[in-house]
Image (tube, rainbow, N blue to C red):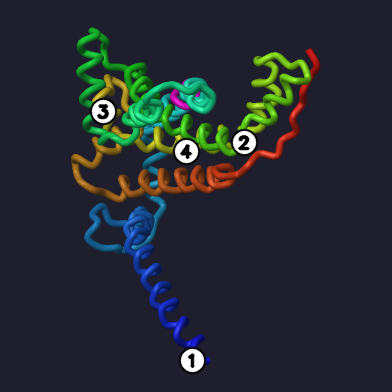
């Protein structure tokens, strides 16, 4: 009994500490959701509950335009990043060359560097290339940091998988292309889906790089930032609450795939 009591006290302290940490992290999110239903136009107090601000969002055509831009940029960036990221993962996991670790770190830099550094660097680069700021420049900026996300997710899966199945397929007569299509891609499917969902979530919520590269058409985070410059209102909270729910949905969906090993059937056709 003494030993049990001895271990129960630290466990209770750790549980309380964990609760306080999560309470501190998620309380601002709860405040955003609660005040999005406020009747008052100010955020000094909660005078009552209403869906008025959500109804106002439905009347904002500029908001839907910005939302469409964000979805278009996110889907476009993920589509391009899936090709580049998967190709890069196959390259790093199959090819040996000097300074491989240094090169992998350099590829990760666009993701780990502060957004303001990447935004300024890309802005200067595009200006030097005489490129007008547009949706295309925003897309290129998002591809720069979503590609490393997918690449390292796929690389991790390829390293755990090994090359046994690919070598067996080639021994049975499959060409490299058939091996890639019928063996490798099905076995890394979960990492591709999880990486794509993570990349889309990051792209959809990104504001700093988008702010530097946006032309006349804005993404949703940039549009929201423009609204906040005129003060915080329940309408801003309503948009933030919807983005929060959407992002949480993507994160929950993403958690089903990241870290899982795909048990898909592997089909090998004789050449």
Which residues fall within the magenta stretch? 76-80
**Disc number placed over residue 92 in the picture, else none:** none
Mark 2 vs 4: CB contact within 8 A: no
Instruction: Write the residue at 26% across / 34% down.
Output: 115
Residue position for label 4:
198
Q: How crowded is mark 4: few (under 14 residues within 10 Å), some or many (20 or more)?
A: many
Q: Is residue 41 left or right of residue 111?
A: left
Q: Residues within 10 Å of mark 1 (few under 14, many from 20)?
A: few
Q: Residues within 10 Å of mark 3 (few under 14, many from 20)?
A: many
**Residue 199, image x and y in percent?**
45, 34
Nearer the N terminus, badge 4 or badge 1? 1
- CA gap, disc 3 and disc 1: 57 Å
- CA gap, disc 2 and disc 4: 21 Å
Residue position for label 2:
161
Q: Is mark 2 on a helix, strand or loop?
A: helix
Q: How many labels does the image show?
A: 4
Q: What element carries label 3?
A: helix
Residue position for label 3:
118
**Residue 110, image x and y in percent?**
32, 29
Residue position for label 1:
2
Is residue 177 visible from the viewing direction of this image? yes
Mark 3 vs 1: CB contact within 8 A: no
- Residue at the extreme right: 270
Mark 2 vs 1: CB contact within 8 A: no
Instruction: Write the residue at 68% across / 20% down.
Output: 179
- CA gap, disc 3 and disc 4: 19 Å
Q: Is mark 1 on a helix, strand or loop?
A: helix
């Amino acid at each position: 009994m003494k030993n049990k009591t001895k271990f129960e006290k630290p466990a209770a302290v750790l549980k309380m500490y964990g609760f306080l940490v999560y309470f501190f992290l998620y309380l601002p999110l709860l405040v955003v959701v609660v005040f999005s239903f406020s009747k008052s136009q100010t955020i000094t107090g909660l005078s009552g509950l209403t869906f008025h601000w959500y109804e106002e969002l439905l009347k904002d055509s500029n908001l839907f335009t910005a939302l469409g831009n964000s979805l278009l940029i996110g889907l476009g960036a993920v589509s391009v990043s899936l090709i580049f990221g998967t190709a890069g993962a196959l390259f790093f996991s199959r090819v040996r060359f000097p300074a491989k670790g240094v090169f992998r770190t350099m590829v990760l830099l666009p993701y780990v560097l502060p957004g303001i550094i990447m935004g300024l660097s890309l802005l200067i680069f595009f200006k030097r290339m005489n490129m007008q700021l547009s949706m295309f420049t925003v897309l290129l900026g998002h591809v720069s940091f979503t590609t490393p996300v997918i690449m390292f997710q796929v690389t991790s899966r390829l390293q755990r998988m090994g090359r046994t199945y690919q070598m067996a397929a080639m021994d049975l007569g499959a060409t490299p292309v058939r091996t890639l299509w019928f063996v490798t891609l099905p076995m890394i499917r979960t990492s591709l889906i999880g990486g794509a969902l993570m990349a889309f979530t990051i792209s959809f919520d990104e504001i700093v790089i988008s702010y530097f590269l946006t032309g006349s058409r804005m993404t949703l985070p940039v549009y929201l930032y423009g609204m906040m410059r005129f003060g915080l209102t329940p309408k801003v909270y309503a948009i933030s609450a919807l983005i929060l729910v959407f992002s949480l949905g993507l994160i929950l969906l993403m958690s089903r795939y990241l870290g899982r090993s795909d048990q898909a059937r592997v089909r090998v056709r004789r050449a």
